[in-house]
Amino acid sequence: MAAVFLSFLLAFSGLPGATALRGFVTDTSGRPIPGARIVVEGETTPGVAGSDGSFEAGPLADGPHRVSVSAPGFQTWEGTIQLPSADIAVTLQQISIDERVVVTATRGDVSVRDPAAATSVLSSSDLSLSASTALDDALRTTPGFSLFRRTSSKTANPTAQGATLRGLSASGASRAIVLADGIPLNDPFGGWVYWDRVPRAAIEQVDVVRGGSSDLYGADAVGGVIQVITARPTTPEVRLALDGDSTATARVSTLTAWSESGAHVQFAGEASRSDGSFVVSEDDRGGIDRRAGVDYVTGRLQGGYDWSSAWRVKGHLGALGESRQNGTELQINDTSERDAGGTAAGPLAGGLWDGAVQLGDQTYHQTFSAVAADRNTETLTSRQTVPASSVIASTTWRRLAGTADIIVGADLRQITATNTDVSYLPDGSIRATTTTPGFERSGGVFAQLRVPIGDRVTLVGGARGDSWQRERGGHRVGEFSPRAVVSVRLSPWLVARGSVNRAFRVPTLNERIRNFRVGNVLTLANHELQPETLVVAEGGLLAQGSRGSVRTSVFTTWLDHAVTNVTLTTTPALITRQRQNAGEVRATGLESEGEWRLMQNLNFIGSLALTHSRFEDTPGLTGNHVPQVPDWQVTGGVRWTAPRRMLAQLQIRSFGRQYEDDRNTLVLRSATLVDASADGPIARTTRWVAAVENLFNTEYDTGRTPLRTIGTPLTVRVGLRFEFR
């Protein structure tokens, strides 16, 4: 008792010889890290950072003390502090490459570990330093990630914004499922992604899991999973982001969150307008060419309640409205989308149960035109309207049985849509109106068992059975997706992994019922398309040291019945293609990514993807490159951190040539782009940001239809960030 009283007296009476260690902990973007642990060598009780990142440890005797500061997902900081001292500021570097995989087997928002997935994590610092505000542009630094064309979502038609991984792209549909806190973002009709659906102010990090994941996620995850994780403040918080750039783009993004006594409510919204940029080179432009860009408004409201009994409920409402100019006077498209859903979770039969339901509906409008060779006149050829609705339901039960982790579940999805296509004669009168209905119902059951063997080995086995129905009352197609995984810790710093699995993807309603035209290329639908099936074998090594981490993976995939746009006829005025099931796509490759601390405040970040993706056993295409897949992609950059002053990054991204078409006659050339960005504090609640995208104004190919289209030019952006707690 006397010792306790003496410690108290020394700490608070102002007597010399004892001082409390005080300070605060933030990440490299300046955000506090609540719950960070502060351990002083020789002391048994660690300090813990509060909601604002502040901490206090001690009292401690005056003199030098060895201190370490740690938090999950961050590199541990270690240093010697001389007491007495002023308040100290500790900045923790977020780990983007380690064994943690924060995706969920249930399409919910609870993280689970997956010891075999090759996963990249884009942290809040990575997103803050992205030269572009578009989420898909930030993801391009991830090994193996690509869209159907190189065009940014800031100027592209949304139908070209399907995400794919590891060289599987052969059409515009996604080969990866994209989730926001477990809620699917893939368009139910076409499989593409509206990357502006989640306001950037609400995004905390993004995880990219490469490799077939159909055993848990079903048909949409044939190539992998992209999970957007939003902020989950535990105290009232307001975030506001303001941006403007040299393309006359203005954007405001906001997040407001409140939480008390188990109840929580959060609203995130974003609005943007833009003049956009030209997608046709100056040498090729004519009188009808205009800038391409997008104006949009999006919002998400969610709330819930957590009981002390561990039961919780949550609901959400979302809406998106966007309008796009696609580069000419007559080529436009717009989309309105709404979704609502709810989840419930709690303890059941010795495990944890959760269930979710999501409802969505949208209307998509698109116009197409024929453009004269001199690009001085164009004629409206068709106008499409596609209303679509979807229902998704899932349930999962999970239990720990000793050291084993068991997951079982089921899900169901139904999509209905109608494509109304009005075609026009050259004089502007209506030629014909066609209406094509579409229907799809799919469902599956799945199970996974994860078993650690000692401290070094983990085994995972999983399987999923699916049923797909493409007509009401029609024939059902069954698919089976097994998976086997082993992870071995060879040493404290080296982990080896290997896996083999089978996955599949069903063709989208868009591929089955909607024709479309881009430039002078007409692509026809095909109602008879069959599912793609994928077999993947991969292995990898993860090396972790005190100064950084490197992960390298090698893989080989066999994609059978690959859906691709097959060229039927070619004339000077029109190229006609049709979506067809090709024979087999064989892709082999190597992916590597790493981060390394060169100096105390200077880090190197890099990634490499080598992909050999070719058609096999396909008449007329055997040996050809799969369209839209480059043989190589390289990203490298340096990031400089000056705690409490500035965070800066210089990044170089280079990609090899790729082909627009299945016959490999239309080449998109290789290119190298340089971006620069920085941010820093103005006050405790305010930060500035500045970025230059495409620093050297490189004109690079994004498509050939057969007209060459180009990517985003040099763009300068400035902005402000406000955070109030």
Image (cartoon, helix red, strand yellow):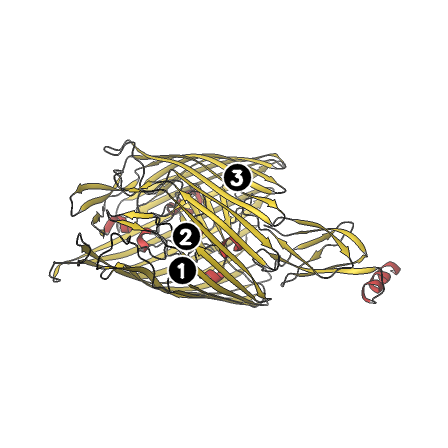
Q: Is residue 478 above or below residue 126?
A: above
Q: CA distance from mark 2 to mark 1?
A: 25 Å
Up-down relation of residue 349 to residue 555 (above or below) = below
Quarter occupied by residue 465: top left
* Residue 109, visible in the rendered structure: yes
Q: Amino acid at mark 1?
A: Arg
Q: Residue at x 23, y 33 (%)?
A: 620
Three-letter code for the amino acid on which mark 3 is drawn: Arg
- The x, y position of residue 309, in whole percent, is 59, 60
**Image location (x, y in percent) of residue 298:** 40, 64
The answer to whether residue 639 is left or right of residue 611 is right
Residue 10: image location, x then y, percent? 84, 63
Q: Which mark is residue 694?
A: 2
Residue with the mark numbered 3: 551
Give me the C-alpha separation between circle 3 and circle 1.
31 Å
Q: Which residue is mark 1?
A: 197
